[in-house]
Image (tube, helix red, strand yellow):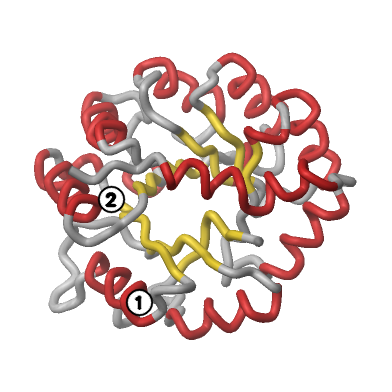
Amino acid sequence: MIVDAHAHIEGLPGCSWLDPPELMVGLLDEAGIERAIVMTYVDAPGDFGAYDPIEYVAAACRKFPARLWGFARLDPGRGAAARELLARCVGELGFKGLKLHPFGYRLSPDGPETVELVRVAASYKAPVLLHCGDEDYTRPLELLRLAKACPEATLVFGHMGGYFHVRDAIAVARECPNVFLETSGMPYPERIAEAVKELGPERVIFASDGPGCDPRLEVLKVERAGLRGSALDRVLGENILELLEKLSPR
């Protein structure tokens, strides 16, 4: 069973990336992926007129209940509003976790607003997917501070350091047992193999970041890392399923 731990849908009018859930489900079918975690490109809460990104994800998950799970992409800078929205998403709407993209809202990943929001996620045992790449606020050694500030939280480093910071991401995960590395968008199969060797297959999670990245190619990238048997099964699906099983909505 292959599970995509990071994919996108979006319905914001005028957005340059309008990706309906039907598009993502079609890509999953082409790649042989059974389920995906989806989120928007925009951060809630926000001023989007009649468009509600959280409801858009919730509606997509209701339409495709056997294929899609939702993560809430939120802006910690919205303070209590973001924390209350996360509690509603996980506690009432059935969302499975939190997505943070610090480069988008330009906040330090270990700032008080972010730490408070991540601690809400941790209180539900909900994983936190963080953009981890080459941009300001997202590099692994910056995210390290958040991992140390919130050891009770499960942090998934999306893109495992991008193009130029993969070895830093592996080093952070080696230091912090609450950090997992996610494979999407990072172009080097050999770095996936290196992460599995350094951390064990239990700490590496497959994702596509589709539709921006082709899920078929992202699956192939993991396969080309040379993983076999139970290690491949863990990376392609079992690890993220185990994290989601820990979720405890109150």
Residue 74 shows which numbered tag?
Answer: 2
Q: Nearer the viewer, residue 200 or 137?
A: 200
**Residue 200 at x, y percent in the picture:** 72, 28
**Residue 133 at x, y percent in the picture:** 58, 41
Q: Which amino acid does label 1 sit on?
A: Ala
12 in relation to 165, above or below: below
Q: Which quadrant would the C terminus be assigned to in this image?
A: top left
Q: What is the spatial separation of the Cα atoms under label 2 and label 1, in whole angstroms?
A: 18 Å
Q: Residue at x 81, y 31 (%)?
A: 194
82 on left or right of 247? left
Q: Residue at x 37, y 61 (%)?
A: 70
Q: Which residue is drawn at 77% across and 48% down?
A: 232
Label 1 Cα neighbours within 10 Å, binned few <14 / some 14-19 / many ≥20? some
**Residue 39 at x, y percent in the picture:** 40, 62
Q: In this figure, which residue is indicated by the disc labeled 1?
A: 60
Q: What residue type is labelled 2?
A: Leu
Q: Which quadrant would the N terminus be assigned to in this image?
A: bottom right
Secondary-structure class at tag 1: helix
Q: Which of marks 2 and 1 is in front?
A: 1
Mark found first going from the N terminus, 2 or 1: 1
Q: Quadrant of residue 127?
A: top left
**Residue 179 at x, y percent in the picture:** 53, 28
Q: Residue at x 54, y 18 (%)?
A: 176
| Number of callouts | 2
233 on left or right of 172? right
Residue 70 shows which numbered tag?
Answer: none
101 on left or right of 181? left
* In contact (CB < 8 Å): disc 2 and disc 1: no
Secondary-structure class at tag 2: loop
Label 2 Cα neighbours within 10 Å, binned few <14 / some 14-19 / many ≥20? many
